[in-house]
Amino acid sequence: MATAPLILALASAELFEELDAVLSSTIEREAAETVLLLRQLRKLDHPRTPLIHVIARRLVHNTVRARDAHHLVDLVVALEASELSVHSHGFISAATSLYGSPFTDKLKKTRGKHQQKILSRAFWQKTPATRL
């Protein structure tokens, strides 16, 4: 993404209206592209004067207002899978305050979709390999 250096430059110059305009173009993209953008911002950010937190806060604020709960759940799961939980927490708290329990219920359901359920009958049945 060529927008990461531009976003960092706008944030460092404190041109927040312009920053929001650039971030608005990333809001409409898929969750994976937002994850890639945040990864690149973290990589390019200066360690002495980090701007990632300012940028992420604005991205969270704008994204939660513009996107539905389903997209936000996908974004949170993608951030967690990419080891960017620091940013997923911001999305979770903002989306929870806006959407409430429908968001949290959908997030729990999506997180647990592929987990093995120990109370299910299929978990305790012997597989063909263990029957030998």
Image: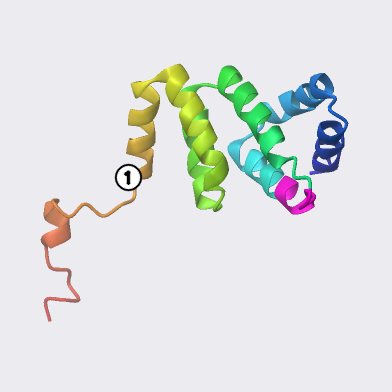
Query: Going by the image, does 69 lie left or right of 41?
Result: left
Please name whichever residue, 34 or 29, is drawn nearer the observer in this view of the structure: 34
Please name whichever residue, 44 or 68, is drawn nearer the observer in this view of the structure: 44
Residue marked by disc 1: 112
| Residue 46: % across, % down | 80, 50
Magenta-drawn stretch contains 57: no
Q: In the image, is residue 132 above or below residue 116?
A: below
Please name whichever residue, 14 or 9, is drawn nearer the observer in this view of the structure: 14
Query: Going by the image, does 109 lie left or right of 87?
Result: left
Q: In the image, is residue 121 above or below residue 93?
A: below
Dot 1, crowdedness within 10 Å: few (<14), some or many (≥20)? few
Q: Quadrant of residue 61?
A: top right
| Residue 100: % across, % down | 38, 20
Query: Going by the image, does 47 lie left or right of 32?
Result: right
Query: Going by the image, does 50 lie left or right of 113?
Result: right
| Residue 27: % across, % down | 67, 27
Q: Determine whether the residue tagged by mark 1 lies in a helix, strand or loop.
A: loop
| Quadrant of the rendering where the C terminus is positioned | bottom left
Q: State the residue at coordinates (67%, 38%).
A: 53
Magenta extent: 40-48
Q: In the image, is residue 41 above or below residue 31?
A: below
| Quadrant of the rendering where the N terminus is positioned | top right
Q: State the residue at coordinates (78%, 45%).
A: 49
Residue type pointed to by label 1: Gly
Q: State the residue at coordinates (50%, 38%).
A: 89
Give the colour scheme shown. rainbow
Q: In the image, is residue 101 above or below residue 89?
A: above
| Residue 56: % across, % down | 66, 35
- In the orientation shown, which residue stands out farthest toward the bottom? 132
Q: State the residue at coordinates (17%, 72%).
A: 128
